Image (tube, grey):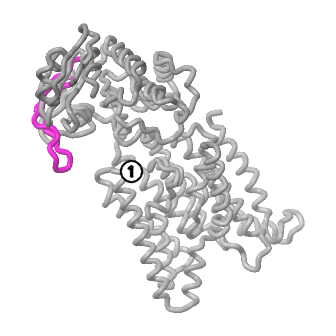
Amino acid sequence: MKHRATWLFAILLVIALPLSLLAGRIWLDPWSTPNAAVILMELRLPRGILAIVVGAGLGAAGAAMQGYLRNPLADPGLFGIAPGAALGAVLALFLGLATAWLLPLFALAGAAGAMALLALIAGRTGGIALFTLAGMMLASLAGALTSLLISFAPNAFAVSEIVTWLMGALTDRGWHEVWLAAPLTLAGIVCLTRAGRGLDALTLGEAAARSLGIQPVQLQAWLIAGVGLTVGSGVAVAGVVGFVGLIVPHLVRPLTDRRPSSLLVPSALAGALLVLVADALCRILPLVTELRLGIALSLLGAPFFLALLLRMRRGMA
Amino acid sequence: MLEARDIAVTLGHHPALHGLSVALEPGTVTAICGPNGAGKSTLLSTLAGLLRPDSGQVLLDGGALSGLVPRVRAKAIGYLPQSAEVAWDVSVDSLVALGRLPHGDAAGAGAAAIEATIAALDLQPLAQRPVSQLSGGEKARALLARVLAGQPRWILADEPLAALDLAHQLALLARLGEAAQRGAGVVLVLHDLALAMNHADRVLVLEQGRLAADGPPQEALSEAVIARVWGVAARWLGEPGARALATR
């Protein structure tokens, strides 16, 4: 009962992964499709695992952010880490350095820069309001710098390359992205679970949380590290994938006892499931070019979220 | 013993407490009274170790409070803030279990303390209910239970009775009185002078960050003190233990 949501999403994920490996414009039959093993091992499996890694990071980061800000509308993008990572990647594209390794490394550097700035500006006091404002300021600065780079792009091809990358996708990703993102995301989720006790205490407000022995500066450090590692590595390998961090904790919360700490792991699993399924849908849809994952999630997420809000409103009335 | 020694606290640029000294005894109910802005909440937060004084220090059993690891301090001092904020719609038993956070044993040895506190505050029928479905009085009881579940030696509560009806005020005071009888030091910020007069063992009256009166309620809340500190002409009516304040 207590881990109901964890089990539910873990089981769904175990069912969804093999299905997603077979799914595509051409459905794979492991016994008859030529080169099935190569397609599976070199294309679809790393892509599926990467979807799980990126989704898990975004789901857990969203749950932690909502717990920290005590606000169900908080999203991992709010801290400026995702925009910072995006800026790094766009810089790599702008400089023509967007190789398979350099682009994610630039993005990680961008995320690290945003984390360092956040820690520098807000980290000493541990106050939540200052932290949030600093994050929003960073997000808007990184967004402006990204736009600036796009407007200075040397040619139309570069612009299109940057804009397409920003939409987020898992197309043509391979094992090296998995090796890059998976350990960082895992480390990030561990950091976020370390923040769980503090997030639970914050349910009662900042003063009560401190009276329960929570150290705001320490809590903030775990959170910056956790969100930075999960979201930073996610953006580094998949571009900007919105909505997951916002909607997943909403979906999961009613299935838990609503304490922020009990939301973290199920949100990671549900986020993994959502991105995995959305990415498989992107592959299946019979469109001229493959639908970008970021667009698909927003198309899927926005109406869903709206329906959820309307249902919640009816429930409250 | 919880002791403030010559503490001065500044909030922003505004001096809130000026060199205040007070020593509180365990096993008693102390009420902190005073007009708005007198520094009551500031004193309570400082005694709870949440605000660090600019000068002077707070001592717990003779040792500096600021020298304690936050979790150790949290085990000794339970603090109930004025705001009844509960950000997520958790159930009453999850809320009460938060009181065990400093001990880290809500799922283990602390479960008995949580259960006992829920029973002591008559919250059993509500244990599974989400806090959004509680009345104001029930929520106040659940929030107090959260503090009591940690079994702190000191219970510091900032206006725990505000927004409660008379019956709930008395019920909560009775629970706090029981905690004091079991040996806990109870310190309450109270606005209702009659409740302080009838239920506190000792009253501290603050005025502009200084101690204006300190002693048994009948002395610290005498008509003369009320006239001087609050600027209100008032008379106590009734018997000791059941006093009412008449104002013109």
Q: Residue A109: tell me if it is visible.
A: no
Which of the pair A278/B198 is nearer the observer?
B198
Estimate how packed mark 1 is, as few (under 14), some (14 to 19) or many (20 or more) residues with alpha carbons within 10 Å: many
Give the magenta-colored segment's residue range. B2-28
Quarter holding the C terminus of chain B is top left
Residue A297, given in percent of the width and then of the height, sits at 65, 64
Residue B11 among magenta residues: yes
Q: Residue at x 41, y 17 (%)?
A: B171
In this orientation, which residue lies closer to the viewer: A65 or A176? Answer: A65
State which quarter of the image contains the N terminus of chain B.
Answer: top left
Q: What SS does tag 1 mark? A: helix
Residue A150 visible in the displayed image: yes
Question: Image quarter for residue A4?
Answer: top right
Which residue is located at x 52 percent, y 29 percent? Answer: B92
Q: Residue at x 62, y 68 (%)?
A: A294
Report x, y in % for residue B173.
35, 18
Q: Residue A209: x, y in percent?
A: 38, 38
Principal secondary structure, stretch drawn in magenta? strand
Rendered position, B217 above or below B82: above
Of residues A142 and B238, which is closer to you in this image?
A: B238
Does residue B55 appear left or right of residue B69 in this picture? left
Q: In this view, does A65 lie above or below A93?
A: above
Instruction: Let me know if residue A257 is in the magenta part.
Output: no
Amino acid, disc 1: Gln
